[in-house]
Image: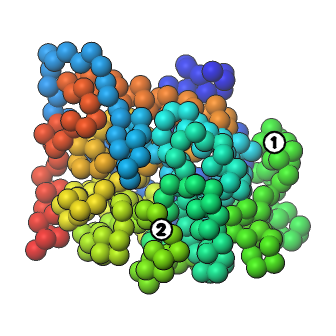
Amino acid sequence: MKRAVAPPRVVKVEDLRRVAQRRVPRVVFDYLDGGSDGEVTLRENCRAFEQVTFRPRHAVAVPTCDLRTRVLGLDLALPFLLAPVGYSRVMHPDGECGAARVAGKAGTGYILSTLSGHRLEDVKAASTGPVCFQLYLVGGRKVAEGTVARARAAGCAALAVTIDTAVAGLRERDVRNGMVELLGGSAFSKLPYISQVLTRPRWLLDFLLDGGVPPMANVVLSDGKPLPLIDVGAALAAAAVTWQDLRWLRQAWPGPIVVKGVLTAEDARRAVDEGAAAVVVSNHGGRQLDCVSATLRALPEVVAAVGDKTEVLMDGGIRRGSDIVKAICLGARAVLIGRAYAYGLAAAGEAGVTRAIQILIADLERTLRLLGCSSIRELDRSYVELPVEWTKRSSQASA
Ligand code: GLV
């Protein structure tokens, strides 16, 4: 195990966050770590997990722990997949290929973001597990058609369509750190922000040896060239997806479509009506509309609305294996982890992602044993207790 991410330095995912903060420039760390506006939802996503308590069954022998599950017809060794994380190659040259490789080795899936620096064909080839593609309509339908055809030819298992990005949320930290200027500005406009980069010489060397700012390898324009990397605000402003686009996509993509960004029963039902094979209860990790509810709180409403018709996944705020267990108890088939592995990637590349997954697996096994439950598939609501005010939300929604 690489020393930077070995115990005692790294015992939990939060420790990887600290190592990442020391390795990458502030502009990169804050892009990964931050949320929108007052970061209320970002904090709530984590806090919601703390409010759910366990109801263990003690004095039960649990000689084996079965972590396997099935998502979209795929057999996974773990009840979590790696979520799409934009700009992963800027965090570390291993980037999307490294994360996908680790996911495959662990027996789980990886979802590649449109805002990625490695070619989707290379990412697919790097993993022995399933790779899905997360689609933004950056560049419009024509460009997306090309990407979708490539994803199909490469053997991607599903298309994930993110529906919560009418525009980008205001990521205040990105503005302060000069993300726009550093990515696209003149040398003169970069000047006030450059010290954050110069104070991370090891990251800078890796970054330069990797070729500097990578183009968006999976957004190829009509002239055959990939779109130069643009900041997230500009990318998402040009990327909004509507239900009409979803209908069109169902013609362009014959495989399963996952609708990511559902927070209410109404949107969940609409997604199912539009043919979603799965929905992801997600608030984009607290990076889009601030002050929406924590995803764990929205999960029961969505499960009650569509859980018998489609698979319900969730993401947001997961930092421990016990968080994953809680989400599954509340009806999620599996979860997506984003920051939890991306902190590892930014801290130490592939080795950091491996460490994050290792920590979560150990957490999961320990939690199941302490709960007196031998399999992820046996988890249900009886293993957790929710705050009373949570139950009011689902009755409000169905009223
Ligand atoms: C990209 O999708 C982001 O939220 O930064």
Seen from the viewer's position, the closer of residues 46 and 394 is 394
Q: Residue at x 61, y 74 (%)?
A: 144
| Mark 2: amino acid | Pro
Q: Residue at x 48, y 81 (%)?
A: 248
Q: Is residue 241 above or below residue 198?
A: below
Rate crowding at label 1 as few (under 14), some (14 to 19) or many (20 or more) other CA atoms within 10 Å.
Answer: some
- The residue singled out by tag 1 in the image is 206
Front label number (2 vs 1): 2
In this view of the protein, can residue 293 be seen by the observer? yes
Which callout, 2 or 1, points at the residue further toward the start of the chain? 1
Rate crowding at label 2 as few (under 14), some (14 to 19) or many (20 or more) other CA atoms within 10 Å.
Answer: few
Seen from the viewer's position, the closer of residues 232 and 179 is 232
Q: Determine the CA span between mark 2 and mark 1.
A: 39 Å
Q: Position of residue 124 (x, y in %)?
A: 63, 49
Image quadrant occupied by the N terminus: top right
- The residue singled out by tag 2 in the image is 254
